[in-house]
């Protein structure tokens, strides 16, 4: 559920940071995107599959 974790994601974050694009930090990403967007989406998919 995070953009941190594998080499291509690190590369994209580093390029964006060097280009002075504002990137969310780890906890900011969790609170802004993962909890309100991804978790309900995953729950809907799980209910639809079952």
Image (spheres, rainbow, N blue to C red):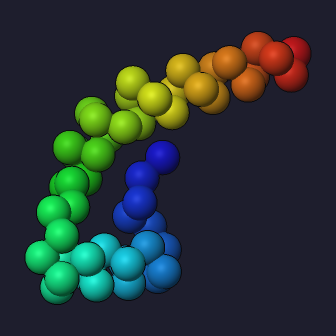
In percent of width and height, residue 9 lies at 43, 73
Furthest-right residue in this view? 50
In the picture shown, does residue 36 fall above or below 26? above
Name the quadrant of the C terminus. top right
- The mark tally for this picture is 0
In percent of width and height, residue 43 lies at 64, 20
Which residue is found at the position 41% from the left and 36% from the top? 34
* Horizontal arrangement in the rendering, residue 27 relative to residue 9 (left or right): left
* Horizontal arrangement in the rendering, residue 6 relative to residue 44 (left or right): left
In percent of width and height, residue 13 lies at 31, 74
Which residue is found at the position 37% from the left and 37% from the top? 33
The quadrant where residue 4 appears: bottom left
Which residue is found at the position 38% from the left and 78% from the top? 12
In percent of width and height, residue 41 lies at 59, 26
**20 or 31, which is in the foreground?**
20
* Horizontal arrangement in the rendering, residue 39 relative to residue 41 (left or right): left
* Horizontal arrangement in the rendering, residue 30 relative to residue 23 (left or right): right
Which residue is found at the position 41% from the left and 60% from the top? 3
The quadrant where residue 28 appears: top left
In the picture shown, does residue 2 fall above or below 40? below
């Amino acid at each position: 559920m995070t953009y941190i974790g594998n080499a291509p994601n690190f590369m994209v974050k580093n390029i964006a940071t060097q280009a002075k694009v504002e990137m969310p930090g780890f906890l900011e990403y969790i609170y802004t995107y993962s909890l309100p967007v991804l978790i309900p989406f995953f729950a809907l998919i799980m209910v639809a599959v079952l």
